[in-house]
Image (cartoon, rainbow, N blue to C red):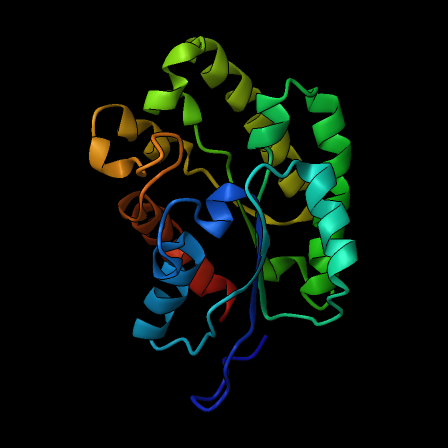
Amino acid sequence: MQKPSSSTELSFLSLGDSYTIGESVAENERWSVQLAEMLRQKGVPVNNPDIIAQTGWTTEELANAITKSGNTKTYDLVSLLIGVNNQYRGQSTERYRKELQELLKTSVHFAKGNPKHIFVLSIPDWGVTPAGESRDRQQVAKEIDSFNAVCQEECKKAGIVFFDITPLSRTAATDKNLIASDQLHFSGKMYQQWATHVLEGVTKLLK
C-alpha cells in the first residue's frame, strides 16, 4: 500500500465484543477510537473506525452479526479482538480455533484481500477485575492464555499481526483506575495503554 496523500482519509473497521465497543466508557475512550486519534497525530489520516461489536459476543455471534450487517465495504485497516466470551462460557479452544479461522478470512476480505492490513489484539484477562473475585482467577488466566495461544498461532498462519495486550490488562489487578465503573470491564485509561502499545506496529502496516 502506498503512503496516502494528506487529502486521503484511510478507512478503519474494528471487529469484536465489549472491549471493542467500549462497555462502560465514552465513545471517544474506545481503544480503536483512541488509536485513530493517535494515528492522526502522527500524520496518518485515518477515519474513526466503523465498529461491529457488542458486549457478550462470541466468535460465532460476531460472525453472524457481520453477515446480518450487510456491510459490503472494504477497508484500509481492520482490527479484531474476540474470544473472551468463548472462554467465559466454557467453550473449547478447538471450537474457537475453527471459528476464528473463519473470522480471519472475513477480515482479509474486508481488508481488500490483504492480510498485512489486519491486526489482532489478544484477549484481556477479565479475572483481575473486581467482578472476577467470584471465580478462580488462576484458572481464568490459564484458560485465557490457552485461547490466546490459539489466536497467535492462527494469526501467524494467516500472516496477520498479533499484539499481546494481555499483560497490560493484568496490571489492573493493582491499579483500579484501569477498571470501568461496572467493575468488570476496563477503563478508557486502560484502552489508551492498548492503543499506545499497538501504535507503532499499526503505523507500519499503513506504510
**Farthest residue toward the bottom?**
7
In the drawing, does residue 140 fall left or right of residue 25? Answer: right
Whether residue 42 is visible: no
The one of 80 and 150 positioned closer to us in this rendering:
80
On the image, the x and y values in percent for residue 27 come to 40, 59
| Residue drawn at 51 percent across, 22 percent down | 145
Question: In the image, is residue 128 above or below residue 39?
Answer: above
Position of the N terminus, as image quadrant, is bottom right
In the drawing, does residue 122 fall left or right of residue 24? Answer: right
On the image, the x and y values in percent for residue 57 come to 63, 39
Whether residue 180 is visible: yes
Q: In the rendered picture of this protein, how many numbered marks are placed on residues?
A: 0
| Residue drawn at 69 percent across, 71 percent down | 74
| Residue drawn at 37 percent across, 53 percent down | 195
The one of 67 and 139 positioned closer to us in this rendering:
67
On the image, the x and y values in percent for residue 40 come to 36, 74
**Farthest residue toward the front?**
182
In the drawing, does residue 101 fall left or right of residue 39? Answer: right
| Residue drawn at 43 percent across, 64 percent down | 203
Question: In the image, is residue 40 above or below residue 201?
Answer: below
Question: In the image, is residue 79 above or below residue 113?
Answer: above
The one of 173 and 22 positioned closer to us in this rendering:
22
On the image, the x and y values in percent for residue 111 come to 67, 64
